[in-house]
């Protein structure tokens, strides 16, 4: 009995928290049929279609930015309809991110054109799950309209979901969509279970997140994604500009050190930080001592 308690204690101490607000997590769940009902609940309101009709298209394509290789997060498509669904998990929303997301919509529209006797065009729906709070609305939808005729261009529609507006919501038997969105704001497994309540679909998600928290391979992929996003966000806060800073080696090194400190503070493994910042293990160990 004591051995079992010690084993459970060790597992809890080694378990990494895995957030739903991650491309890596989303792709993992979406590929498993057993979790499709969860995604139906949070995505179907914007598509009016059963999400099980769609498959995850994993090949990323470039947005056209020559300076930074920004890439598409999640793309869903189906052979049964002329619709592409773009999903963005925005943990660090900014004007730059929103502009980039719109570029993805136009890129997807252009790539959806098929040559042949008759050009067949697909409609694009983008859904942005933003880790931020909006003062007035929890959701917003945008399209393009002619300013003179007020005629809507129906090629695409962009939906914004402000996740922090749902923080604190718990499942009460009659608020499944709101509770599922609240899951994206959780910071611990305990909070996830409080939100899920007795909802079976939500509890399946929580169980799998806890299992993934003990999976070293998944944890490495998750850490790499988190680190890349933190690096981009930190660089943006520095006001970093590719052209102006390209020749300033000292400034670039100082930026890497600042980013590394933030990542180490957040518990990202030292080997992962080293691989992605270019700083040596020895340098990072010194930074750990300074912290």
Image (cartoon, rainbow, N blue to C red):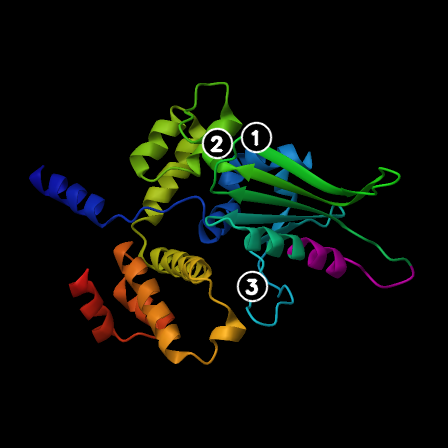
Spatial CA distance of label 3 from label 2 is: 27 Å
SS at circle 1: loop
Q: Are marks 1 and 2 in contact (CB under 8 Å)?
A: yes
Q: Nearer the viewer, residue 197 or 265?
A: 265
- Residue tagged by mark 3? 70
Can you see residue 49? no
Q: Is residue 176 visible?
A: yes
State which tag comes first along the sequence, 1 or 2.
Answer: 1
Is 113 contained in the magenta span? Answer: yes
| Vertical order, 110 against 164 (above or below) | below
Marks 1 and 2, how far apart at CA: 8 Å
Q: 210 and 222: which one is in front?
A: 222
User: x%, y% of residue 125?
Assistant: 68, 45
Horizontal and vertical percent position of residue 247 = 46, 81
- Disc 3 is placed on an element classified as loop
Badge 1 is on which residue?
A: 137
In the shown orientation, is residue 230 left or right of residue 101? Answer: left
Q: Which residues are magenta?
A: 104-117
Residue 165, numbered circle: 2
Residue occupying image coordinates x 44% and y 32% = 182
What residue lies at 57% left-to-right and 71% top-to-bottom?
Answer: 67
């Amino acid at each position: 009995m004591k051995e079992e308690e010690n084993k459970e204690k060790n597992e809890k101490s080694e378990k990494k928290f895995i957030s739903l607000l991650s491309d890596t997590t989303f792709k993992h769940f979406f590929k498993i049929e057993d979790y499709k009902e969860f995604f139906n609940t949070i995505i179907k309101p914007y598509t009016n279609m059963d999400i099980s009709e769609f498959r995850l298209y994993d090949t990323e394509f470039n947005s056209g930015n020559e300076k930074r290789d920004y890439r598409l997060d999640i793309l869903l498509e189906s052979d049964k309809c002329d619709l592409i669904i773009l999903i963005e998990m925005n943990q660090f929303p900014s004007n730059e991110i929103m502009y980039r997301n719109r570029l993805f919509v136009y890129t997807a529209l252009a790539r959806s054109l098929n040559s042949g006797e008759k050009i067949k065009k697909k409609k694009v729906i983008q859904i942005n799950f933003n880790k931020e709070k909006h003062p007035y609305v929890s959701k917003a939808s945008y399209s393009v309209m002619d300013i003179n005729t007020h005629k809507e261009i129906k090629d695409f529609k962009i939906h914004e979901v402000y996740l922090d507006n749902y923080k604190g919501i718990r499942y009460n038997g009659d608020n499944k969509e709101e509770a599922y969105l609240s899951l994206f704001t959780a910071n611990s497994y305990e909070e996830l279970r409080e939100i899920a309540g007795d909802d079976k679909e939500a509890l399946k998600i929580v169980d799998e997140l806890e299992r993934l928290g003990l999976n070293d391979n998944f944890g490495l992929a998750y850490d790499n994604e988190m680190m890349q996003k933190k690096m981009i966000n930190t660089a943006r806060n520095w006001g970093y500009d590719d052209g102006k800073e390209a020749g300033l080696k000292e400034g670039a090194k100082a930026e890497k050190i600042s980013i590394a400190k933030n990542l180490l503070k957040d518990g990202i493994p030292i080997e992962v930080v080293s691989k992605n910042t270019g700083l040596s293990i020895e340098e990072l160990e010194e930074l750990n001592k300074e912290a």
